[in-house]
Amino acid sequence: MSLTTRDEVYLDGSWVTPAGSERAAVIEAATEQQLGTVAMASVEDVDRAVASARRALSGPWAALAPAERAELVGAFARELRARAAQTAELVSRENGMPIALSQIVNGMAPYAITRLYAHLAGGLGGRDERPSPTGGRTLVVREPVGVVAAVTPWNYPQALAIMKIAPALAAGCSVVFKPPPETALDALLIADAAEAAGLPPGVLNVLPGGREVGAHLVAHPGVDKVAFTGSTLAGKAIGEVAGRLLRPASLELGGKSVSFLLPDADLALFAGKLAEISLPNNGQTCHAATRILAPRSRYAEVVEAVTETVAALRVGDPLDPGTQIGPLVSRMQQEKVLGYVDKGRGEGARLTTGGARPERPGWFVEPTVFAEVDNDMAIAREEIFGPVLCVIPYGDVEEGIAIANDSDFGLGGVVWTADEERGVEVAQRVETGTIGVNHYELHINAPFGGVKESGLGRELGPEGLEPYLRHRSIYLS
Ligand code: NAD
């Protein structure tokens, strides 16, 4: 079977030709050449998939005891692991992610996350009977919330999909998953893994498609919960639909996080982690810490360190393990990012490195740094989603905190300081869902999500299972 020509979608436990005739060309980000083609689902396919997912809720899947479900989810995890190398390479070719990162987030993370939820699924049994003050008892049971609509973006296509699919399956839900056209090829490997693991028909349906298909799915009367990751704009539109339908929705949206250097920060430590924390996946990362807040007393020193570090990054073929910055996902994204570079210049920020499109095929943008950035500028306020950093000066730490919080977003962040306790104090005053002190990582066993326009709800960790369960109280005499 070709991994790059896919004529069918995965629906009701079978590979089927979609109802419409639309096919998307998948273009390799580093070469601008066609990598493959993929059949796009239509709204009719969504209707069939939702019906199949509903049937699954009363079939053999629903009859499984938690331990049996855990076993099946564990088998799914192993099938994902068996495809890890293929998946990592495919994503790097689709969206330009450097392979070293792709092997972790698209290769191993799906396995690790699914294994975590398989383990948590096993713990869902047991009887929770509570004595009532009137002398009776109440049996509290947790049950699957139902059919889940999972809609994801192209930037971390595997991890973001599995952060929804794995807890949903662990809870006993069924899923209709709609990946975007840019990364549809790797999404279908998830369907291959589900089939090989023997998940019953309808438990996981994978329907690559565009926005209209996504919009049809999230508003579908047969859906019980929406799990979305993507832009704030789309998240608000989906939130409106979910509000109207009184349908629970988790929304993981955009970001503009800070890398906040306190006056006693270790600059070498900060510079050593700059690429990983501020420019992961070529800057196409929702939690990237792209606003660097530097104390005025050390501003010149920080600008120099950021500029030197960014100028030395290895830009190149995403399939080369030494590459630190690959191409962006598409020409549209490249043009958008270069547009922000022009905007930054026009707003009076000082470009210290980068800013151009390298002379080579592929949708590259040179890693770019702006100094003398005011927090009111568009480059400091809007999510650029490319390799562009802003260094913003502040006076005292109180002013730094005020600038950090003067943002529509709140998703990630890092505080740099020699005093960890002070770092945790400052971290707690930054309005954000996740933040580090001298480090930042997505820990699969800790909740991840945003505040303000970065979204609603949390994924990962035991907390990430809760949205897929609902409680029923049964009063006993
Ligand atoms: P996007 O919002 O354009 O698309 C995301 C997905 O939603 C795609 O599958 C798309 O087809 C679908 N979609 C778009 N509009 C829809 C609608 N009205 N109804 C239903 N489905 C719809 O986002 P993108 O450009 O593909 O991805 C980049 C964005 O994702 C960035 O803003 C980034 O910050 C965000 N993101 C957030 C997180 C997080 O965890 N907070 C993680 C990764 C990416």
Image (cartoon, grey):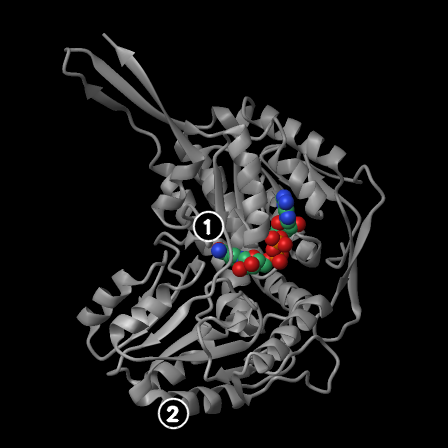
Label 2 beta carbon within 8 A of ligand 1 = no
Position of 467 with respect to 474 (left or right) is right
Q: Residue at x 56, y 51 (%)?
A: 79
Position of 174 with respect to 22 (left or right) is left
Q: In terms of depth relative to the viewer, which is nearer, 23 or 354?
A: 354
The answer to whether marks 1 and 2 mark residues whose Cβ atoms lie closer than 8 Å is: no
Which quadrant is the N terminus positioned in? Answer: bottom right
Label 1 beta carbon within 8 A of ligand 1 = yes
* Residue 455, numbered label: 1
Which quadrant is the C terminus positioned in? Answer: top left
Disc nearer the start of the sequence (1/2): 2
Q: Which amino acid does label 1 sit on?
A: Gly
| Residue 43 drawn at (x, y percent) | 74, 36
| Residue 377 drawn at (x, y percent) | 50, 73
Res. 192 in view: no
Position of 135 with respect to 255 (left or right) is left
Estimate how packed mark 2 is, as few (under 14), some (14 to 19) or many (20 or more) residues with alpha carbons within 10 Å.
few
| Residue 420 higher or lower than 353, as above or below | above
Q: What residue type is labelled 2?
A: Ala
Q: Mark 2 points at which residue?
A: 300
| Residue 362 drawn at (x, y percent) | 72, 77
Q: Residue furthest top?
A: 477
Q: In terms of depth relative to the viewer, which is nearer, 43 or 323?
A: 43
| Residue 106 drawn at (x, y percent) | 55, 61
Quarter of the image for residue 404 reads bottom left
Q: How many marks?
A: 2
